[in-house]
Image (cartoon, coloured by chain):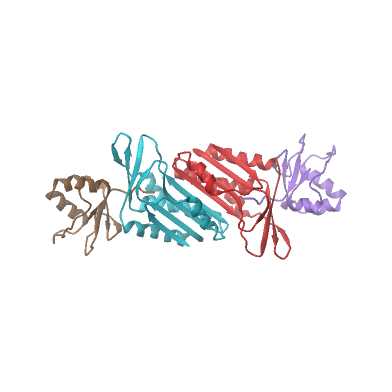
Chain colours: A red, B cyan, C purple, D brown
Amino acid sequence: MIEVRLQAERFDPGAELARLEALGSGAVASFIGIVRGEGGLASLRLDHYPGMAERAMQAIADEAASRWPLLGLVLVHRHGTLAANERIVFVGTASRHRAAALEACAFLIDWAKAKAPFWKQETFHDGTTRWVEARAIDDAAAARW
Amino acid sequence: MIEVRLQAERFDPGAELARLEALGSGAVASFIGIVRGEGGLASLRLDHYPGMAERAMQAIADEAASRWPLLGLVLVHRHGTLAANERIVFVGTASRHRAAALEACAFLIDWAKAKAPFWKQETFHDGTTRWVEARAIDDAAAARW
Amino acid sequence: MLYFAWVREAIGRDGERVDVPADVTTIADLLDRLAAGSDDHARAFADRARLRAALDQEFVSLAVPIGQARELAIFPPVTGG
Amino acid sequence: MLYFAWVREAIGRDGERVDVPADVTTIADLLDRLAAGSDDHARAFADRARLRAALDQEFVSLAVPIGQARELAIFPPVTGG
């Protein structure tokens, strides 16, 4: 089961995990990225490149599936406007081997951050907006795989 | 928030994750270990060393909290008799940094497997039982941290 | 051409049809040409180190020839996840 | 002393009170002494490579002196998680 979803709607990590757990693999890892509401942040807007974003997510998922023995993989990324404390991204992996599940999970979020066409714009309570700057550390995290 | 629980009762990963997400850290990682129902397995019994098991789990959690900048950490391990597809262990971490959350999560399950006094006994559908043998790979996984 | 994030805001639109001049080879060449003809483009393309590109939905360097590609996108380094 | 997993099954009980003889120093010494006095203990302690110990709830090697410890546990390598 490889499942990639780009959506405006919220998602439920417990439900995503339950589907991965039902595969009977024994080891399920997950990562959730959430909007931090600090520094006066009111909301986050996720701009994306329609078409390419889905393709890039699918390519990243396929790459993970080729590198690790996974029984299941779920990658969900939201777009549009998100409030503080809303979930942005979910990565879940199921494998017979815990190391494979955990490593594939880390790989997926590292590559999703560095290689999928999304851009974050912050809006603050005072009305100002700011495009989030890319960080060299994210490229380095993606390059280690 | 550091929370360590040894319990016979089932747990709900979605509920555990929700509490970690509510800390506002932005990055939440988790690992779930589940009884694999293959090879004719009917049930798994988890023997443990009362008193020492809780102490070892707490020490492992404290070690993780000292090594990574975590806002939250949950380690739940069940004991007693578990059916196929039941959850055995939950590890969840919350951090501002995704690498910290993911690494601490991997550390916690590696050390829980190698350094907490639990023993698994398998019962098969034909009535036979077998104590699971420790694997050198688990010691190696714990030693890398 | 498609523009995303602050590149889109600087240029003031999310894309435009561009016929690649015969003497333009690479993406960087095309950005030079567009910058020469419009202040908005000049401002958006001023700092090439802050720009990334995708040609027919594949990430490429600005030094890559455009060739027969049908879709070119210009945007800042990605920040999703 | 406390026994867990197949060590408990081999000995047939989950623990017993043991007064450490004056000429016994290490955990291994004590296992030798108990094995000499009971077939069940001898069988349970036959392969020392498969045994682990905790002294007052801390993992230790079998070569460690028992000293004034109040609780000694013998068990196979752990397999939880």
Q: Position of residue B123 (x, y in %)?
A: 32, 39
Q: Quadrant of the N terminus of chain A?
A: top right
User: At 26% from the left edge and 49% from the top edge, which residue is drawn?
Assistant: D51
Instruction: Tell whether C20 sits left or right of B25.
Output: right
Front-most of A53 and B32? B32
Q: Position of residue D63 (x, y in %)?
A: 24, 55
The image quadrant of residue A4 is top right
Asked whether the viewer can see residue B68, the reply is: no
Instruction: Tell whether B57 sits left or right of A54.
Output: left
Front-most of A114 and B70? B70
Q: Position of residue C43 (x, y in %)?
A: 81, 54
Q: Is residue D74 above or below residue B83?
A: below
Instruction: Tell whether B116 sits left or right of A127.
Output: left
Task: Name the outermost residue toward the right.
Answer: C37
Front-most of D47 and A129? A129
User: At 47% from the left edge and 49% from the top edge, which residue is drawn?
Assistant: B31
Q: Is residue B27 above or below residue B138?
A: below
Q: Quadrant of the C terminus of chain A?
A: top right
